Amino acid sequence: MVILLTIIHVLVCIFLVIVVLLQSGKAADLAGAFGGMGSQTAFGPRGSATVLSKATTIAATIFMITSLTLAIFATRNAGGVSSVTEQHKGAPGKPVAPTSPATSQPAKPGQPSVTVTPIGPTGVKGQSTTQPVQIPSQPGAGNPAQPQPAAPAPAKK
């Protein structure tokens, strides 16, 4: 059903583009070329509805109906998943190697650290470990909060 509706939607889109491009503008006469409206109405003269204008109206209506229907089908088939991460939680992937507490280094007081919790391919959480964050020893290398040291001034002779 969705595939058939999508095919109809694409065909109506193509038809709508062609029909709109085939129509001439309201001010397509000689007076319109020089800025004249041809009438004192606010939006230009209203002529009789041509076959192309009727086809545009019908195609636009079908386009809106198929768009709304496809949107409703898309939300109903989502299955209640609220995010992309929940949708791929059970997807098979590379297994996560759990870190053992023996290989992690304890963080020193005052040193920044990160708590790591590995999640396996089935969504099961592993044991959390705290690992210290390495801070570069050179001032300003990687830490934008630290100012760069000024270059020494050249010696004058």
Image (cartoon, rainbow, N blue to C red):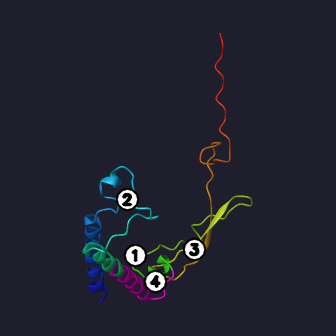
**Disc 1 versus disc 2: distance between alpha carbons?**
68 Å
Residue 153's spot in the image, x, y percent?
66, 23
Q: Which residue is mark 2?
A: 38
**Residue reaching furthest top?**
157
Q: Which residue is mark 1?
A: 93
Of circles 1 and 2, the one toward us is 2
Structural crowding at the residue carrying mark 2, measured as other residues with C-alpha within 10 Å and reported as few (<14), some (14–19) or many (≥20): some
Q: Secondary structure at mark 2?
A: loop
Residue 16's spot in the image, x, y percent?
29, 72
Of circles 3 and 2, the one toward us is 2
Q: Earlier in the sequence, mark 4 or mark 3?
A: 3
**Disc 1 versus disc 4: distance between alpha carbons?**
9 Å
Q: Residue at x 46, y 74 (%)?
A: 96
Structural crowding at the residue carrying mark 1, measured as other residues with C-alpha within 10 Å and reported as few (<14), some (14–19) or many (≥20): few
Query: Amino acid under label 2?
Result: Gly
**Disc 4 versus disc 3: distance between alpha carbons?**
14 Å
Q: Tell me if residue 42 is in the magenta stretch.
A: no
113 left or right, relative to 88:
right
Q: Which residue is mark 4?
A: 122
Q: Secondary structure at mark 4?
A: loop
Residue 75's spot in the image, x, y percent?
44, 85
Q: Which residue is mark 3?
A: 117
Residue 106's spot in the image, x, y percent?
66, 65
